[in-house]
Amino acid sequence: MALLRNATLPNGITSTDPRIITAFKAVDSVLCGRGNTMLQRLANVHLMRLFGSLEAIIKSDRHNGRIHREPYYRDAHIAMDIYLSAQETHSNTDELRCKLRRGRKRFSKRWSYLATVSPLFVLVYSDAAELIVKDFKRIHNPTLRLVGTTVLDTCPDRLVGICTRLARAAEAAARTNHSLDMRQFSAAQIRQSFARS
């Protein structure tokens, strides 16, 4: 919940809002730390969601005349520039951009493929998934998408529903700075959903 609280963008902000940099730094602190592997999986998925939100904000800013971009300089490039500005080291910007795009962002995108409808789905995979996600040469993105879709299709509908509702409730609580009311997710419901799988 702390990751979501520190790294969820509020509604109605512009691309120059300093909370965007704060959100990227919060995600990076988890990704670059030596902490919990499951939390790092969630942070990888959240990084891609953060990029998606930021690109939508940039698009809105562009349509409202707050941003003027050069030809062939897409919203994704502007988002990457903002992400670059959140990094502590800036010695070689081109090298850092390549490292972040081809490394961290690419890795996070692959976890997003496995997450499908809910970030919580990355928690159902064993440790072997870490090796598969890192194997860019042998396991291609369409294959990962297929794996994510297959896992989603084989999960009981109730489990999918609980994961989706729990993720949405956590995001809403983080966005509004409220606590998460877990009463709507009884332990018996969750256990029952896992027992049917």
Image: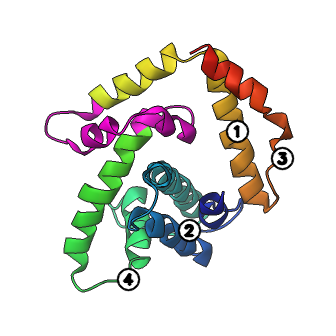
Q: Which mark is residue 88?
A: 4
Label 1: element kind:
helix
> Magenta stretch mostly in which secondary structure?
helix
Which numbered disc flags the more N-terminal residue, 1 or 3? 1
Question: Does the magenta segment cover residue 133?
Answer: yes
Quadrant hosting residue 164: top right
Which percent across, then down, holds residue 8? 63, 60
Quadrant hosting residue 188: top right
Please tell me how crowded label 3 is: few (under 14), some (14-19), or many (20+) other residues with Cα within 10 Å.
Answer: few
Which percent across, then down, holds residue 183? 85, 39
Which numbered disc flags the more N-terminal residue, 4 or 2? 2
Q: Are marks 4 and 2 in contact (CB under 8 Å)?
A: no
Where is 30 relative to 143, above or below?
A: below
Q: Residue at (36%, 28%) from the top-left corner? A: 145
Q: Which residue is mark 3?
A: 181
Q: Which residue is mark 1?
A: 166
Please tell me how crowded label 4 is: few (under 14), some (14-19), or many (20+) other residues with Cα within 10 Å.
Answer: few
Which numbered disc flags the more N-terminal residue, 4 or 3? 4
Q: Is residue 68 visible?
A: no
Which numbered disc flags the more N-terminal residue, 2 or 1? 2
| Residues in magenta, as a range | 113-142
Q: Which residue is mark 2?
A: 23
